[in-house]
Image (cartoon, rainbow, N blue to C red):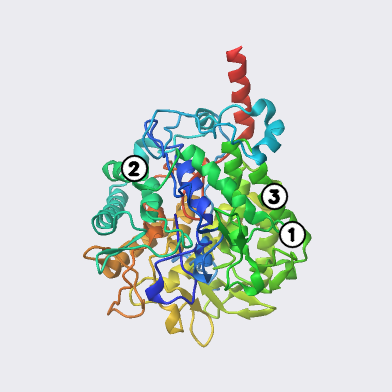
């Protein structure tokens, strides 16, 4: 799962990262995404049987985030993107050519499949129907009708265009790149081995003091093992099978769970539904899974819900509908869209705080970083995950992007493109590390906007990514600060002491990975390697990796926290950056805000296979 921290949090308290995307992109987000997304490329002999909640659990669980910092975590990231070196014109502008992507399938390849933790090969994941069948299931039973067959991963596999793990597990043909990929793999093993040795079963490792950290990333539920859950697919993708099997065994035997995963994840999804019982249908940020009582975060303005929390549910909830054949999950997130489409948006922008009671904006604060980020990311990714059939998501995304360009995108005197924050019409010329995801986001959407703007969007993505890279190169450690500014005579540097920390965040590297895959410009791999070297020099300690409190001094002070997202996102994106594109190809996979893969849903293909199956059965 994932946690990230919002700006303004002390370096010592960075153990929880509510991601830039929201304390847990919804506890469920990590679960569904990680476990079900990975099912498609894991071996038949594996199946994750359990997840985080016992039947008796009655403590609050976050539907959004846990604190402003957590919100950022789930909001998942503001991300500052950089300006590609060697591609800057006299005006500081960047032009990058988009590599042609062929997304139209001609042949269906068989993909290795599935479960994240021991059990029979190929078992369909459906919630058994019983006397305890939920009201929501009964209400939608008629909708399922002839399509109420058990969920079949075999059908999904058959609709993938390429094998998930590619040829030779995505091993690059270039020996130098392969050597770099192996280094990233060694970093993952080192981080994992120390977590296992000193913090096994805890949420995160404190590598300096060599002990575990529990924190409150799951609210106050007392849930454990976030680093294990978050690392499962990373370990598998890297071929660290002994470590993967250890993690799988822990999930099976040590989590306080009472039922197999396929049932529990759907049960958890149902338990989250009461959070949507508001006058508008906009969910509140926290829910007690026992009583169903929900409430908003105390720090959130006037009891409001957070854009990056309630806006970062689409991928997981739509996938829950696919798994359960129950349309209620999709209906909930589509209702959120209806509310957002209906209300007036200042200058076309989406402020970060919305009242779940009145449906009105509470503050006119707009950010592509913490509190807002993942909402925009999920719009374009919803469109891509739907096999480009979700036209509403597409319209909302490109409409929002136009408003962002018109109001937030700025050019510094030194030629750097950045995204400012907007506070009631006044620009704050600050960009957060979390906002640096936006380079990759704009890049993956370049193909599907207006044809005449395709190159424009790719150039914008490259410029933002370049700016984020500059925030790294302008520090002594070559790692980027939590937030950097473009006023007071400085550019792409943190001018405030409380913005100088780096907590192993992935957003900049995430954009490198996407931009590499879209353009194959070698500078992105070079920039990624610079980050590897900086992580090794400044963040690697004797017993793991730690964030640092000031990126502008070579006398490093460690924050003593190996964040869960370092294993699930930072190292995974680095590994993908140094792998061939056929390892989790973008034609077939969408990464959620915590870097867990979900498959592109090709409904026409699935329907054809269902028809074929019925014909054969007759």
User: What residue is shown with label 1?
Assistant: 279
| Residue drawn at point x = 48 percent, y = 67 percent | 82
Element carrying mark 1: loop
User: What residue is shown with label 3?
Assistant: 334
Front disc: 3 or 1: 1
Q: Position of residue 6 (x, y in %)?
A: 49, 70
Outermost residue toward the top in this view: 618
Q: Is residue 300 left or right of residue 265?
A: right
Residue 17 visible in image: yes
Identify whether 552 is placed above or below 29: below
Q: Position of residue 541 (x, y in %)?
A: 24, 67
Report the front residue among 523 and 587. 587
User: What residue is shown with label 2?
Assistant: 253
Report the front residue among 244 and 528. 244
- Tell me, for residue 45, which label it has, or none: none
Residues under labels 1 and 2: Cα distance? 41 Å
Residue 576 visible in image: no
| Residue 191 in which image quadrant | bottom left
Residues under labels 3 and 1: Cα distance? 15 Å
Whichever of callouts 1 and 2 sits on the residue coming sooner in the sequence is 2
Q: Please state, as top left, top right, bottom left or bottom right, where the C terminus lies in the image.
A: top right
| Residue drawn at point x = 23 percent, y = 56 percent | 197
């Amino acid at each position: 799962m994932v946690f990230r921290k919002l700006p303004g949090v002390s370096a010592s308290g960075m153990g929880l990262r509510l991601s830039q995307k929201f304390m847990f992109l919804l506890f469920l987000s990590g679960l569904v995404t990680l476990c079900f997304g990975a099912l498609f490329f894991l071996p038949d002999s594996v199946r994750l049987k359990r997840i985080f909640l016992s039947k008796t659990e009655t403590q609050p669980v976050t539907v959004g985030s846990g604190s402003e910092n957590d919100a950022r975590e789930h909001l998942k990231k503001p991300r500052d993107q950089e300006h590609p070196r060697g591609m800057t014109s006299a005006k500081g502008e960047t032009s990058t050519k988009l590599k042609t992507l062929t997304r139209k399938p001609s042949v269906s390849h068989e993909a290795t499949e599935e479960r994240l933790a021991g059990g029979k090969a190929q078992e369909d994941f459906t919630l058994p129907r019983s006397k305890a069948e939920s009201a929501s299931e009964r209400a939608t039973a008629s909708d399922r009708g002839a399509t109420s067959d058990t969920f079949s991963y075999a059908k999904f596999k058959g609709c993938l265009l390429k094998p998930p793990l590619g040829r030779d597990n995505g091993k690059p043909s270039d020996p130098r790149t392969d050597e770099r990929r192996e280094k990233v793999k060694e970093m993952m093993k080192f981080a994992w081995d120390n977590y296992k040795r000193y913090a096994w079963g805890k949420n995160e490792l404190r590598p300096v003091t060599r002990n575990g950290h529990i924190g409150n990333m799951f609210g106050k539920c007392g849930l454990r093992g976030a680093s294990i859950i978050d690392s499962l697919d990373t370990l598998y993708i890297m071929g660290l099978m002994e470590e993967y099997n250890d993690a799988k065994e822990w999930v099976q035997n040590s989590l306080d769970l009472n039922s197999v995963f396929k049932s529990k994840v759907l049960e958890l999804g149902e338990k989250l539904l009461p959070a949507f019982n508001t006058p508008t249908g906009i969910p509140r940020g926290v829910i007690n899974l026992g009583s169903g009582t929900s409430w908003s975060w105390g720090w959130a303005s006037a009891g409001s819900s957070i854009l990056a929390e309630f806006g970062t549910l689409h991928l997981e909830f739509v996938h829950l509908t696919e798994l359960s054949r129950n349309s209620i999950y999709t209906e909930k997130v589509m209702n959120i869209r209806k509310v957002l489409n209906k209300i007036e948006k200042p200058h076309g922008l989406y402020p970060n705080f919305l009242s779940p009671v009145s449906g009105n904006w509470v503050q006119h604060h707009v950010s592509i970083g913490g509190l807002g980020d993942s909402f925009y990311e999920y719009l374009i990714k919803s469109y891509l995950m739907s096999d480009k059939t979700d036209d509403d998501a597409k319209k909302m995304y490109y409409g929002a992007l136009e408003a962002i360009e018109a109001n937030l995108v700025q050019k510094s005197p030194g030629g750097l493109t950045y995204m400012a924050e907007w506070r009631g019409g006044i620009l704050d010329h600050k960009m957060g590390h979390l906002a640096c995801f936006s380079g990759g986001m704009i890049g993956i959407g370049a193909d599907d906007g207006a044809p005449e703007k395709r190159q424009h969007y790719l150039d914008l993505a490259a410029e933002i990514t370049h700016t984020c890279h500059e925030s790294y190169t302008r520090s002594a450690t070559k790692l980027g600060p939590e937030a950097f500014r473009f006023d007071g005579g400085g550019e792409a540097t943190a001018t405030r002491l409380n913005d100088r920390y780096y907590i192993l965040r992935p957003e900049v590297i995430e954009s490198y990975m996407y931009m590499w895959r879209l353009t194959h410009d070698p500078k992105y791999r070079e920039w990624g390697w610079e980050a590897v070297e900086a992580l090794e020099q400044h963040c690697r300690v004797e017993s793991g990796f730690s964030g640092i409190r000031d990126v502008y001094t070579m006398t490093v002070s460690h924050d003593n926290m190996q964040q869960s997202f370092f294993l699930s996102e930072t190292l995974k994106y680095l590994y993908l950056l140094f792998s061939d594109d056929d390892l989790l190809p973008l034609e077939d996979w969408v990464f959620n805000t915590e870097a867990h893969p979900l498959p592109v849903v090709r409904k026409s293909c699935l329907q054809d296979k269902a028809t074929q199956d019925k014909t054969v059965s007759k």
